[in-house]
Amino acid sequence: MEYATLNTEDKDKTPFLENLSLYIITGVVFLLPIFFIPSISVPFLFTKSLLIFISILSAFFLFLISKLKRGVLTLPRNLIILTAWTIPLAYFISSLFSGNIGKSLLGQGFEIDTFGFFAVMALMLSIVPLLFRTKESIFRIYITFGFSFLLLVLFQGLRLLFGDNFLSFGIFIDSTANLIGKWNDLGIFFGLILMLSLITMEGLSLNKTHKIIMYIIFALCLFFLSVINFFSVWIVLGIFALGLFIYNLSRNKIKSAGDDMSLDNQTIIVQQHSNKTLTASLIVLIISVAFIIQGTLIGGYFSSIFKTSQIEARPSWQSTIDIAKNTYDKNILFGSGPNTFVNQWTLFKPQSINNTLFWNIDFNSGIGAVPTSFITAGLLGGIAWFAFFIIFLYSGFRILIINSIENISSYYLSLSLFLSSLYLWIFTVIYTPNAVIITFAFLLTGMYIASLRYMPTAPIEKEISFVSNQRIGFISTLILSVLLIISAVSLYIIGGQYISSVLFQRALIAANIDGNLEKAQSKINNVIKFGSSDRYYRFASELDLARINIFLSQSQENEDINKRRTEFQTLLGSAISNVQKAIKVDNKNYQNWSMLGIVYGSMVPFGVEGAYENAKQSYEKAITFNPHNPSLYLAFARLELLRPNANMKEAEKFISLALNEKNDYTEAIFLLSQIQVQSGDIQAAIKSAEAVAFLEPNNPIFLFQLGLLYSNVEDNEKTISALERAVALNNNYSNARYFLGINYFKTGRVEDAIEQFKIVSDLNPDNQEVKTIIQKLTKDEDPFGKNDINDDIIKRKTLPIEGE
């Protein structure tokens, strides 16, 4: 046994500012997985992104100032860094042709798929090799990862043990909420730590203490990965474990050379060895295979114990490829523009998505982050990513596989950093990780480049002297000044976006939780001062509409008509103006055009001149940007019914178009039944519904429609039978239970009616109408008054339970 110490040439004599930059990067590594502000009004991921942005820029400028003061700058000659910069370059060029430059350059919340984000990432990848010049500094990052990991384990473990409400801080409201971000992002992070521990155990011969620590970390990672049960993580880990197992079985590549690391005068004990233990990689391989084959069964066991379950939807590979093809038909070189995938999704999404639970979700990315770049940044962005990955993989293969290794520490650091980076880069291709994971991918790649200086064929570094060449010094100072100005402006813009995001959350809370529209209006006005986002203007318009509805419902006698007209026109003008501003921010977002249609449509019943025509044009524009969204056709149908002389035929035509897009669209079927009833064609409607129910007897939607039609002809027995079958097929079908409860009440089955309404209330705890019905039923009161129930059903224009 021997004690490994660091060579004296590795001792750092770095200037203060460079050390400070190094500590900032180290601090980011520690804080990023666990940092959050415990406030519901503070955007969780945006806060982490802002931390990344400020930290990297601060470290960069401290480093540059230090180098300019010394007059010498040493740059690594590495193609990985060069190709990394082609990614933000491609994004910048694509942004210029996007049609929405601001959204593509910096986004509306420093989103991942923007030029700004990847520019900061490339900057970090470039300065990390310049800052991490010793093995000690690189190893310190591993220690930092370890401490951050332990805090994350402690937090998440306590929440698993004591339940959702423990350590919730008002923002971690469900069992899968965590400090990293999405549940699967947490799984990727634990997989990364497992990778590092696995490589450490099989790449170094540790003393007993360090081996115990590694196995504890190893076991903790496996436990949390089992709870999370992200299928893709198991596949990637299984492949890596198999590779390590075969490699260590066939070759004892790593040899002890008596040179190792020490950190803060604490040596790592390294034992001379010849027989490698393969236990760890074999364990990972076996467990991975078990979860790949029986992940649903095993994961379900853990989920039932810890009450953790989640569904994360994203476009498939085929959908992503189809959208890329359609995008390339219009602009193959530059794509649709960074940060615009959602527009391409709504424009080209497959109609089959409407037959799933996710039909009304507007996805912001494709199957993975890199495939999304192929769409938004075009072929130019795709080539940049391809070149980066090729150079990265070639470097790893050439340095780590072909070349001989002189000492264990150099090989261990380079191997662990390369494989850890590769692990994270794989997930950028097959998944869309959040900013935390992508930041670690760039960071570890930069550290891998830094570790190459200790390899036998390390690339020669280039030294630039500012002192010996005044021209270079002048140009360097000029470039630094320009970069400072650009960064200051970017920080101002992103800082404004962050403040507006916080204020917007408070406006939402004021409107939706506090019910204070005046307070919400005041806050949204402040939001717009700090940031310009179409969603802010849309929300402001929604507030205007809510205030209009309140204004119209509070009509009083002897009130000045001119005053009321002026107030009404002011509110209406504000609503229209806000939506038009949203359209100006993003004229390709169908939601903005749909909102304009809603605003104008709300004026149609009052006979406002031009309201119908403007609403119609707005909905037509919305449909051009989202042609397969059935809700837009339904909105058209409702617009036809809002006219003083309702056009039933046109409404039916648009309902038919909605059902062509989504044949089980409950709200469209419900509206159609009301039109048929009002048209007096109930028997024909019943016959057609019976035929459909016969063809699809296991479709609860059609049974629900049939039950409504039976109810309209007061055939209580058939109504109850149809609705009971619908409920049996879909136990959470709230609207079916609602009308089943009504018909139970009509036939004197009050207790059965109460039971149905209680279930509806449990499924929809915020529905006050259902709570009122239950209260009256339990008091033996008639919750429906003296009105005819069938007439109430006929007159109802919307479903009692929204969202189905």
Image (cartoon, rainbow, N blue to C red):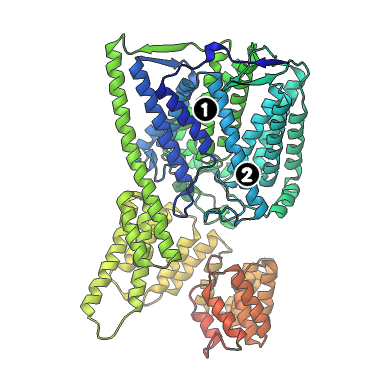
What SS does tag 1 mark? Answer: helix
Q: Is the C terminus in the top left, top right, bottom left or bottom right quadrant? A: bottom right
Can residue 596 be seen at all in this image of the molecule?
no
User: Image quarter for residue 469?
Assistant: top left
Q: Dot 1, crowdedness within 10 Å: few (<14), some or many (≥20)?
A: some
Height in image: 9 above or below 115? above
Label total for image: 2
> 735 or 420: nearer the eye?
420
Quadrant of res 33: top right
Q: In this view, does 410 lie to the left or right of 697?
A: left
The residue pinned by badge 1 equals 386
Report whether residue 27 is seen: yes
Q: Which amino acid, by three-letter code, is at mark 1?
A: Phe
Identify the disc placed on residue 154.
2
- Dot in front, 2 or 1: 2
Q: Is residue 188 above or below residue 771?
A: above
